[in-house]
């Protein structure tokens, strides 16, 4: 298994308005991105479980041209900037996904059938 954070160049979160957080996951290699995309494990349900929200509130977008997954989840608790908000910019909200496990050991090249995961041109 590979952890999501070990496959990325950039892993960050930020506000997407006062009530939403967006998470940007930019992969270090095209192979990593394609494997995660086609493995089908980074789902709305899996993300919702990590953030304690309903699956239908989670949006996941794959942007092939820049090896990036963008995930949008509702902020938990108070809105951005409200009294009691501990992360006004939403910059610390990607943490629950850092150790998300992806099948196959991509870092040592033992992922099954990497040809299957090539992106269509």
Image (cartoon, helix red, strand yellow):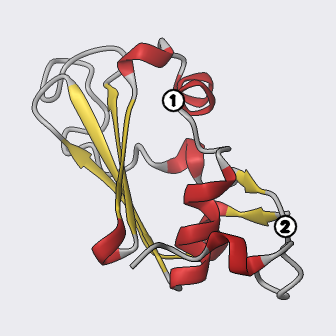
Q: Position of residue 12 (x, y in %)?
A: 37, 60
**Disc on res. 21:** none
| Residue at (77% x, 83% y) in the render | 107
Q: Please identify the quadrant where the C terminus is shown.
A: bottom left
Q: Please identify the quadrant where the N terminus is shown.
A: bottom right
What is the distance, in whole Å, between disc 2 and disc 1 at their CAs?
A: 21 Å
Q: Is residue 34 above or below residue 19?
A: below
Residue that mark 2 sits on: 104
Q: Nearer the viewer, residue 105 or 77?
A: 105
| Residue at (53% x, 85% y) in the render | 29
Q: Position of residue 33 (x, y in %)?
A: 53, 70
Q: Secondary structure at mark 1?
A: helix
Q: Nearer the viewer, residue 112 or 52?
A: 112
Q: Position of residue 39 (x, y in %)?
A: 68, 54
> Which quarter of the picture shows residue 21?
top left
> Which quarter of the picture shows residue 4?
bottom right
Q: Earlier in the sequence, mark 2 or mark 1?
A: 1
Q: Secondary structure at mark 2?
A: loop
Q: Position of residue 88 (x, y in %)?
A: 20, 38
| Residue at (84% x, 67% y) in the render | 104
Disc tally is 2
Residue that mark 1 sits on: 44
Q: Nearer the viewer, residue 45 or 81?
A: 45
Packing grade of label 1 (10 A; few <14, some 14-19, many >=20) is some
Q: Is residue 4 above or below residue 19?
A: below
10 sits to left or right of 100: left
Packing grade of label 2 (10 A; few <14, some 14-19, many >=20) is some
Q: Is residue 72 above or below residue 29?
A: above
> Which quarter of the picture shows residue 83?
top left
Mark 2 and mark 1 residues within 8 Å of each other at the beta carbon: no
34 sits to left or right of 26: right
């Amino acid at each position: 298994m590979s952890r999501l954070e070990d496959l990325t160049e950039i892993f960050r979160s930020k506000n997407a308005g006062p009530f939403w957080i967006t998470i940007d996951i930019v992969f270090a290699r095209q192979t990593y991105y394609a494997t995660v995309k086609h493995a089908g494990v980074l789902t709305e349900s899996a993300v919702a479980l990590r953030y304690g929200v309903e699956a239908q509130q989670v949006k996941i977008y794959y942007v092939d041209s820049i090896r990036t997954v963008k995930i949008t989840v509702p902020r938990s608790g108070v809105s951005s900037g409200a009294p009691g908000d501990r992360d006004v910019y939403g910059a610390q909200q990607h943490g629950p996904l850092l150790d998300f496990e992806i099948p196959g050991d991509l870092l040592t090249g033992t992922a099954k059938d990497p040809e299957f995961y090539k992106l269509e041109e």
